[in-house]
Amino acid sequence: PLQLTLAVLKPDAVAHPLVLEAVHETILNNKFLIVRTKELMWRREDSQRFYQEHSGRFFYQRLVEFMASGPMRAYILAHEDAVARWRSLMGPTKVYRARNTAPDSIRGAYGLTDTRNTTHGSDSVASARREIAFFFPEFSESLWYQQD
Ligand code: CMP
């Protein structure tokens, strides 16, 4: 059965055409179905709202600033086990860990810092549903599943 996840190429990735291209290729090479994709840019309010759960953390301000600093590309991806599969391709959040334990992962290869870490991916099916609605409010999951 197909599962949906939300993947986001963050401003550091979109700012570098070769990184953007490489991550897009990774998506295609791993046989994800691209259900929707769009480029967008957040206002600081969007960034604050999306990362609400991190509002007490030391990195919150820099995260909010960074995510509103330039255009991003968001994808709704479908695959069996899409959530876990995309997270595994991204590698660990922190760049030091990513480079050392998963050098071939997206963050291991392209991550700049713990904040500028190239990509985001939903961490569960429930997060995916919430985050897809945040980025693609016009998208209807139930209608999409009924299409085939
Ligand atoms: P993301 O998967 O989008 O979820 C939360 C984000 O916070 C994370 O990726 C990083 O971009 C950012 N962040 C910055 N510093 C840290 C940190 N020390 N630990 C975890 N996340 C961090």
Image (spheres, helix red, strand yellow):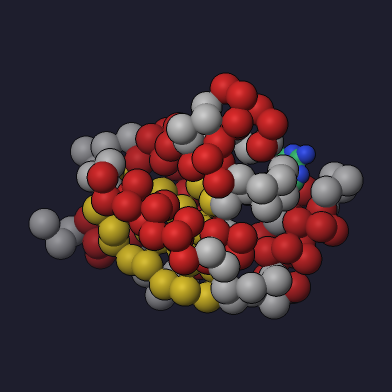
> Image check: 59 left or right of 29?
right
Which image quarter: residue 93?
A: top right
Q: Position of residue 34 (x, y in %)?
A: 29, 58
Nearer-the-camera pick, 87 or 113: 113
Residue at coordinates 88% horizontally, 46% vertically from top-left? Answer: 58
> Image check: 129 left or right of 95?
left
Residue at coordinates 57% horizontally, 22% vertically from top-left? Answer: 101
Q: Is residue 146 above or below residue 4?
A: below
Q: Position of residue 147 (x, y in %)?
A: 15, 62
> Image check: 7 left or right of 25?
right
Q: Quadrant of the N terminus?
A: top left
Q: Position of residue 103 (x, y in %)?
A: 52, 30
Q: Is residue 127 above or below residue 18?
A: above
Residue at coordinates 66% horizontally, 60% vertically from top-left? Answer: 50
Most extreme residue toward the left is 148
Q: Is residue 7 among the parts visible in the rendering?
A: yes
Most extreme residue toward the front is 18
Nearer-the-camera pick, 65 or 101: 101
Nearer-the-camera pick, 90 or 56: 90
Nearer-the-camera pick, 135 or 105: 105
Q: Position of residue 117 (x, y in %)?
A: 63, 48
